[in-house]
Image: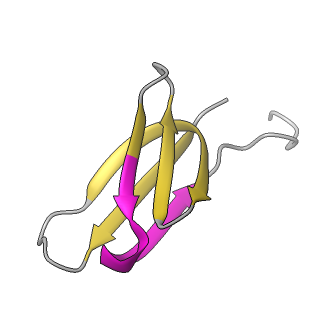
Amino acid sequence: MSITVKISLTETSQVIEHEAKNTYTKGPFFCVYAVDGTVFKYPVANVWRVAEQYGDSGRPQS
């Protein structure tokens, strides 16, 4: 299962998008653990908005 994570930073006009396994904070960083094992770290002070879109896990298939 993956999560679509969209990050808006205070000083950028483009949204940064990742396919992730997980997100978490570690000290002053918001971390995105990507599907390929890469960890992207963004200073929390620079993060304006985060949107996480989860799949339809647990919902019956029609």
Residue 30: x %, y % from top left = 48, 60
Is residue 29 covered in magenta?
A: no
Between 7 and 45, which is closer to the camera in this rendering? 45
Residue 36: x %, y % from top left = 45, 19
Is residue 50 covered in magenta?
A: yes
Q: Quarter-wise, where is residue 1 in the image? A: top right
6 lies left or right of 2: left
Residue 59: x %, y % from top left = 85, 44
How many numbered circles does the render carry? 0
Residue 12: x %, y % from top left = 13, 71
Between 2 and 23, which is closer to the camera in this rendering? 23
54 lies left or right of 14: right
38 lies left or right of 58: left
In the figure, 49 relative to 56: above or below?
below
Between 6 and 30, which is closer to the camera in this rendering? 30
Q: Which contiguous range is marked in magenta?
A: 41-53
In the figure, 10 relative to 18: above or below?
below
Residue at the far top: name it: 36
Q: Is the magenta region chiefly helix, strand or loop?
A: strand
Identify the residue at image location x=42%, y=72%. Answer: 44
Residue at the far front: name it: 27
11 lies left or right of 2: left
In the figure, 52 relative to 10: above or below?
above
